[in-house]
Amino acid sequence: MKPKRRLGELPKAAVQRWWRFKIRNLARRVSRARMRRKLPRLERARQAALRSTFETVKCYAIKNENGKFKGMSTLFNIALYLLIADRDIQAAKIDALTHPDEWTRKLNARIILLTIYEWDADRVTGRELKDAMELMLIPDELRREAVEALRALRVIQRKANKKFSFVRNAIIAHRDPNALVQYRAIRDLNVDEVMALGVEFFAAIEKFVSVHMKLMHAGNTFQSYVRQWSAATKA
């Protein structure tokens, strides 16, 4: 077994690579430490707005759960479904980006990826949404806007399915019996790529929430309420 050479005995190019590696790692640790202090402050306003929106939508979803206004109930259920995913990702985001322990960062990144990957758009936004908008007499242009907002979410999920299906099976669902395969998949997981997908998901949810407000406003008419009430009494 050859004795290890000291740093000064290595070729110049190897020494330069070693120093670049050390400096890059140090810079990343310093950056994470700074962001761990700074990011919660930057996210405070968004988190407060998200909590407020979540509480409002949750209350209306409960209020309309067994009521006579099926269209309203469907729309609030869809919005709450999206906001639950949004809050889950938001809760994991800061640790995924800034936690000093690499395993913890990647665990939170896996939680974010799982939330996006397993989100089932069609279960709550398929035929029921179209029926609700029809029942509430939502204008055609606004219906198309709602469908387009949800399509953006499906596109993001397809990206997750295409790029991270192996990661999902190997290290999120833990389906691969080969522990080394799991370990290497965790080791090689690119948190930045996961977070980029998370940012897209945030933006798409915010877009739908904006459209949701327009839908509720458009459906807040006497004709809409009468139509929903009539449909409920006939059921």
Image: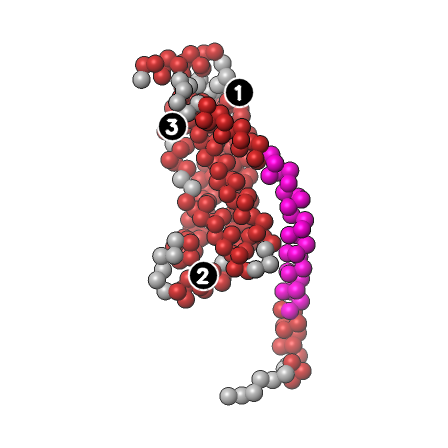
* Residue 200 percent coordinates (x, y): 53, 43
* Residue 133 percent coordinates (x, y): 43, 23
- Give the labeled residue for mark 1: 217
Tag 2, which secondary structure? helix
48 and 169: which is toward the camera? 48
Residue shown at the point (48%, 50%) measured from the top left: 111
Q: Is residue 54 above or below residue 161?
A: above
Q: CA distance from mark 2 to mark 1?
A: 47 Å
Amino acid type of the residue that numbered disc 3 sits on in the rendered structure: Glu
* Residue 68 percent coordinates (x, y): 40, 17
Ranked by sequence position, the earlier of labels 2 and 3 is 3
Q: Quick check: can you spot residue 222?
A: yes
Tag 1, which secondary structure? helix
- Give the labeled residue for mark 3: 128
Q: Are marks 1 and 3 in contact (CB under 8 Å)?
A: no
Q: Are marks 2 and 1 in contact (CB under 8 Å)?
A: no
Question: How many C-alpha atoms fall within 10 Å of the one at disc 1: few (<14), some, or many (≥20)?
Answer: few
Amino acid type of the residue that numbered disc 1 sits on in the rendered structure: His
Amino acid type of the residue that numbered disc 2 sits on in the rendered structure: Ala
Q: Is residue 157 above or below residue 31?
A: above
* Residue 112 percent coordinates (x, y): 49, 48
**What residue range appears in magenta?**
22-49
